[in-house]
Image: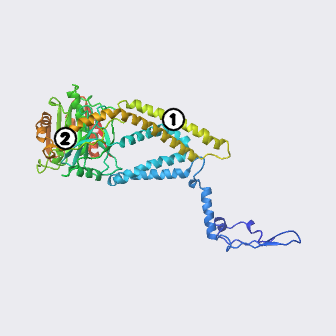
Amino acid sequence: MDSRDTWHLRKPRSREVLFPLTNSVPTPRPKVFGARGASVLTVPPPSWSTSVSAKEAHRSYWTDYLYDQNPILKWQKTGVSNMAGEISLLFGFLLWIATIPPIRRKFFELFYYTRHFYILFIIFFIFHVGISYTCIMLPGFYLFLVDRCLRFLQSRRQVRLVSARVLPCEAVELNFSKSHGLTYNPTSVMFINVPNISKLQWHPFTVTSNSNLERDKLSVVIKSGGTWTKKLYQLLSTPSSIDRLVVSVEGPYGPISTDYIRHDTLVMVSGGSGITPFISITRELIHLKTALKWKIPKVVLICAFKNSSSLSMLDLIFPISGTPSDISDMKLQIEAYLTRDKELKADGPIHPKTIWLKPNSSDAPIHATLGPNSWLWLAAIISSSFIIFIILIGIITCYYIFPIDHNSNKIFSFTLNAFLNMLVICVSIASVASAAFLWNKKYNAKEVKQIQNMEGSTPTVSPNSMVYNAEKELESLPYQSLIHATNVHYGERPDLRRMLFEHRELSVGVLASGPKIMRQEVATICSSGLAENLHFESISFSW
């Protein structure tokens, strides 16, 4: 046997083992085919000029090796799809990067738009693990889809913005019309979208009104800080202010219950715009005291502001209308601290001005998405949509998936199976939720029309050059009581340790809202063990 015929039987050298295609390959001698005496067909030896080059063969070798030997790069038709998991992990990594506090605060719009990647994260995660393992998280995932669908339906409506109170501290209070059946608890939050500023951005703000004290109004306070809030303040504070503002909302969302009256004294510590949740709590206590004649705790509000113009935030403790005429018997004490001003500066307005906006037939009052019996409707949506999902996926499995899996040599794709299940879930929830939403919308149409007729008499322009009865408000009994209950301290910060320890009642509730450092200081004082009667609770709305 010729040595050229046995070259492939030799033990390869180390270089040949690592790079078998980069070495010079011996050319085998020609082969002769045909019977004896017949014509002979000779096949010429291959040469690198007529075949792939060594470089291309080397690349092809490693590409095939990586794909065949490394399952990370495969999208399996059956079983776990690693490629889908890697894509899901990538979107999850982008979500995590955008939530880093410096990025989230300095580039809020980047954070806001990046967080929508959660949709792709969930989709590829389901492709990765398959629909069978997804059923482990199906209850939570199903409820999440129901919530998102109902919130989307609510956000499509334009709501009626009745008026806006513009404050000199670059803050505005928006007053919306609402149905009487909509109730919510203090410290609730509502998402607001203003298409004139951005059609995609939704921002959460604290609800300052009380559903019992103001049965036909819902209010939120927005402090100018970021790009979106500054544009809104400029839109409403300019002399040539618009007469109508298109607004959509989601919510309000809030705690199930708030048990503030169980304490003997309620101390509320705020910094800057952190006073907004305490406005809603104060209005709730006013309602309990004046309307229901309940025994309420003594209320101490400690608020710190930067300058004199921020004192106008205290005017929001009372609503535009609906405040009881006599609240003098309510034990209310307000300690306001101005950290930068040494004295009251009267070089500008210190009271808010009210702007009345024109009504529009397309605007509707804010009402509960599923009506007054929302819990019953929610249970009906969840149960009925799930039954529809089971029926539809059963039909698809019986007449489409099962014949491929069991009546042929093929295996139905796990990815396509997961996609069909997700599609059927979304269709079931969207159809049932839309039907329930439209039913309640038709049911509330009569009340909406009555409210719109009542608001027809609302002035479209505020009297006295956009200042709504400023002198009358200042001379009213509630505002006189507010003035007598307020002590203003200039050029200093509150001594929280002394002010909290001086309360000797058996139970003192301490609420803190504002900057993180301030909330941590209050928490440290309450947990020091020097006063066992202090019960701390933090209210934070930071993103």
The image shows residue 18, relative to residue 516, as above or below, that is below
- Kindly state the secondary structure of the residue where label 1 is placed: helix
Q: Nearer the viewer, residue 456 or 351?
A: 456
In this orientation, does residue 525 appear? no
Q: Specify few, some or many for label 2: CA neighbours under 10 Å numbering under 14, 14-19, or 20 or more.
A: some
Q: Nearer the viewer, residue 378 or 177?
A: 177
Q: Quadrant of residue 326?
A: top left
Q: Nearer the viewer, residue 399 or 39?
A: 399
The image shows residue 48, relative to residue 456, as above or below, that is below
Q: Specify few, some or many for label 1: CA neighbours under 10 Å numbering under 14, 14-19, or 20 or more.
A: some
Q: Residue at x 23, y 46 (%)?
A: 172
Q: Residue at x 12, y 44 (%)?
A: 464
Q: Which residue is mark 2?
A: 459
Q: Residue at x 54, y 44 (%)?
A: 420
Name the quarter where the N terminus is drawn. bottom right
The image shows residue 90, relative to residue 214, as above or below, that is below
Q: Which residue is mark 1?
A: 388
Disc 2 or 1, which lies upstream in sequence? 1
In this orientation, does residue 514 appear? yes
Q: Where in the figure is residue 399, as x and y percent of width and height?
A: 61, 40
Which three-letter amino acid code belongs to the residue tagged 1? Ile
Q: Where in the figure is residue 382, as x and y percent of width and height?
A: 45, 34
- Kindly state the secondary structure of the residue where label 2 is placed: loop
Q: How is the image coloured?
A: rainbow
Q: Where in the figure is residue 209, as x and y percent of width and height?
A: 25, 37
Q: Where in the figure is residue 173, as x and y percent of width and height?
A: 23, 43
